[in-house]
Image (spheres, rainbow, N blue to C red):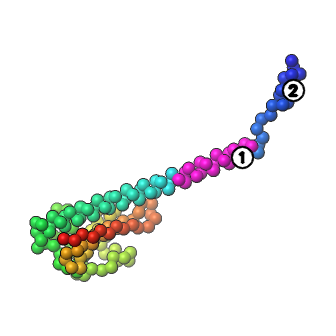
C-alpha cells in the first residue's frame, strides 16, 4: 500500500512556475484590456453628458429668443452684434458692436458675461437680425481641451 501511494505521488505533479507565470500574464492582459475599455467608456459617457447639458442650455437660449421675438421684438439686438439672452426675459446683454470670429483666442472677452453654471460660456451672433448663431463652449472635465456646439436659428 505504501509503495502504491509513493508511485501515485511520483506520477502526480503540480503546476510548474512557467505555467503559473503564463496564467498570470494572460489574466493580467485581460484585466488591463478590460480596464482600458471601461476607462474609455467613462470618458465617452462624460463627454456625452457635457454635450447634452450644452444642448439644453442652447435650447433654452433659443426659446428665450423666440419668446422675445413674439412678445417684445423691439428688444431684439440689431444686425451685426454679439449678445447673450438673460433668463429673466429682459433685454439681452450686448457684448460688442460687431460680430467677431469666435475662435479660441478671443473667447476670454465673454467669460463672466455669458456664463452658465460657471462651466459653459454662451454667445449669440447675428449678421442680418433674422438668423442667429448660438455658441456654447466649455472646458472639458479632466482638463483635456475645449468643446463647442453651434446651433443656428432663424426667426
In the picture as drawn, the residue positioned furthest to the front comes out as 154
Judge whether residue 95 can be spotted in this image: no
Left or right: residue 114 compared with residue 6: left
Q: Which residues are magenta?
A: 19-37
Up-down: is 10 above or below 2? below
Q: Which residue is mark 2?
A: 7
Q: Residue at the spot x=31%, y=75% of the render?
A: 109
Numbered badge on residue 138: none
How many numbered markers are drawn?
Answer: 2
Left or right: residue 102 compared with residue 83: right
Q: Quadrant of the C terminus?
A: bottom left
Residue 62 rendering spot, x and y as whole percentages: 23, 65
Q: Residue at the spot x=27%, y=64% of the render?
A: 58
> Mark 2 falls on what kind of element?
helix
Question: Which of the 4 image quarters holds residue 123?
Answer: bottom left
What main secondary structure does the magenta stretch of the protein show? helix
Residue 25 rendering spot, x and y as whole percentages: 68, 48
In the picture as drawn, the residue positioned furthest to the top comes out as 1
Q: Is residue 22 magenta?
A: yes
Left or right: residue 90 compared with residue 115: left
Up-down: is 16 above or below 91? above
Pick the front one: 35 or 69:
69
Q: Residues within 10 Å of mark 1 (few under 14, many from 20)?
A: few
Residue 133 rendering spot, x and y as whole percentages: 27, 72
Q: Residue at the spot x=76%, y=43% of the render?
A: 17
Q: Which residue is mark 1?
A: 22
Question: Which of the 4 image quarters holds residue 126?
Answer: bottom left
Of mark 2 and mark 1, the one earlier in the sequence is 2
Amino acid at each position: 500500500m505504501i509503495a502504491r501511494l509513493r508511485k501515485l505521488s511520483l506520477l502526480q505533479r503540480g503546476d510548474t512556475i512557467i505555467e503559473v507565470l503564463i496564467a498570470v500574464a494572460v489574466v493580467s492582459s485581460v484585466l488591463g484590456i478590460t480596464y482600458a475599455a471601461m476607462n474609455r467608456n467613462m470618458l465617452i459617457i462624460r463627454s456625452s453628458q457635457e454635450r447634452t447639458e450644452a444642448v439644453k442650455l442652447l435650447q433654452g437660449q433659443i426659446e428665450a429668443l423666440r419668446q422675445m421675438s413674439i412678445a417684445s421684438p423691439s428688444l431684439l439686438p440689431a444686425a451685426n452684434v454679439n449678445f447673450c439672452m438673460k433668463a429673466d426675459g429682459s433685454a439681452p446683454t450686448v457684448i460688442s458692436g460687431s460680430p467677431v470670429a469666435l475662435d479660441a483666442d478671443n473667447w476670454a472677452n465673454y467669460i463672466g458675461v455669458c456664463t452658465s453654471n460657471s462651466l459653459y460660456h454662451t454667445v449669440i451672433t447675428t449678421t442680418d437680425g433674422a438668423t442667429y448663431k448660438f455658441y456654447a463652449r466649455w472646458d472639458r472635465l479632466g482638463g483635456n481641451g475645449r468643446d463647442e456646439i453651434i446651433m443656428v436659428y432663424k426667426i
